[in-house]
Image (cartoon, rainbow, N blue to C red):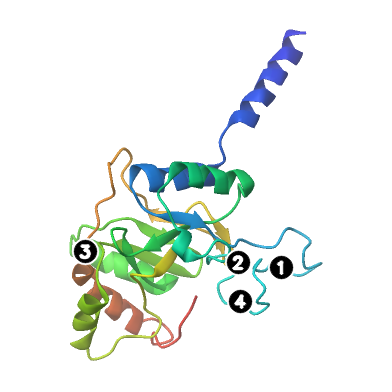
Amino acid sequence: MREILGRRRGLRFRRKRRPAHLDAALLCATEWRWPVLPGVGLEPAGGRGDRERGCACPDPDCVVPGAHPFDPGLLAATTDERMVRWWWANRPDAPVMLATGGRAPCAVSLPAIAGARALSVLDRMEMRLGPVVATPTRWSLLVAPYTLEQLGELLYVKDCVPSSLRFHGEGGYLVLPPSETGTGQVRWERAPLAGSASPWLPDVEAVVDALVEASTSAPDGGSRLRY
C-alpha cells in the first residue's frame, strides 16, 4: 500500500514540475529583462508522414524551420510575466525566441565550425566572453546592444565580411536554449553564470575581428550563408 501511495505522490510531483521552456522564458523575461516570445516551432510528429518534421509555418521551403516568430509576431516580444506564462501554458514546447536589440542583447552568428575556431582564438587572447548559443549548424555570440550605425561603421573598414556571418541587431531575433528546431537541439556552449542578475556582454567591436577571420578561413571560404 505504501509503495502505491509513493508512486502516486511521485506522479503528482512530476505533473507539477514546470516545463523547461517556460522556466527559460521566465528567466530571460523577469530576471534578465530580455523580451521574449514563442517561436513557430515544428509540425507535430507525423505531420508530414514519413518525412522529417518541418516548420509549422505555411512556407514549405522555410530555411529556418521552427526557429522564427510567426504568430505572435516579433513585435509582441515582452518581459511581462503573465503574458509569458500564458504563451507557454498553451504551447509548452514552443521555442524561446529573444527579440534582439534595444536594451536586449544583440548577437553575431556564424557556421558551427567557424564558431568553434573563433572561440578558440578568443580564448587564447584571454578575451572575456558572454553567453554563446549553439545549434548543430550555427553558433551565436551574444554581445552588448549596438545600433545599425555602429555596426555599419565597424564593418565599413573591413576588407571583406563573409556572407556566412550574420548580425542579429535591432529588429532581429535569436532562438535560445532549450529550444528544438529543424536543425536540432539548441544549447548553451557558454552558459550565463548561475545567479547573475544579468549576463555580462562584450562589445561587438571586441569580437568581430576574430569572427570575420574564423568565417573567412572556414572550409568553404566563409562565402556560404548557412542557417
Residue on which disc 3 sits:
124
Residue bearing the label numbered 4: 62
Mark 4 or mark 3: whose residue is earlier in sequence: 4
- How many dots with numbers? 4
- Identify residue for label 1: 52
Quarter where residue 57 is shown: bottom right
Can residue 110 be seen by looking at this rendering?
A: yes
Identify the element where label 4 is drawn: loop
Dot 2 lies on which element? loop
| Label 4 or label 2, whichever comes before in sequence order | 4
Q: Amino acid at mark 2?
A: Gly
Q: Earlier in the sequence, mark 2 or mark 1?
A: 1
Separation of residues labelled 2 and 3 (CA atoms): 33 Å
Q: Indicate the amino acid at tag 1.
A: Glu
Disc 1 versus disc 3: distance between alpha carbons?
40 Å
Q: Which residue is mark 2?
A: 182
The residue positioned farthest toward the bottom in the image shown: 159
Circle 4/circle 2 CB separation < 8 Å: yes
Regarding mark 1 in the picture, which secondary structure is present there?
Answer: loop
Q: Residue at x 65, y 77 (%)?
A: 59
Local crowd size for mark 2, using a 10 Å CA cut-off: few (<14), some (14–19), many (≥20): some
Q: In the rendered structure, are the residues bearing label 1 and label 3 in contact, judged by CB atoms less than 8 Å apart?
A: no
Q: CA distance from mark 2 to mark 1?
A: 9 Å
In the visual, does 54 lie left or right of 217?
A: right
Percent position (x, y) of residue 106?
32, 65
Q: CA distance from mark 4 to mark 1?
A: 13 Å
Tag 3 secondary structure: helix
Q: Is residue 175 visible?
A: no
Q: Is residue 218 above or below residue 30?
A: below
Which mark is first along the chain, 3 or 1?
A: 1
> Amino acid under label 3?
Arg
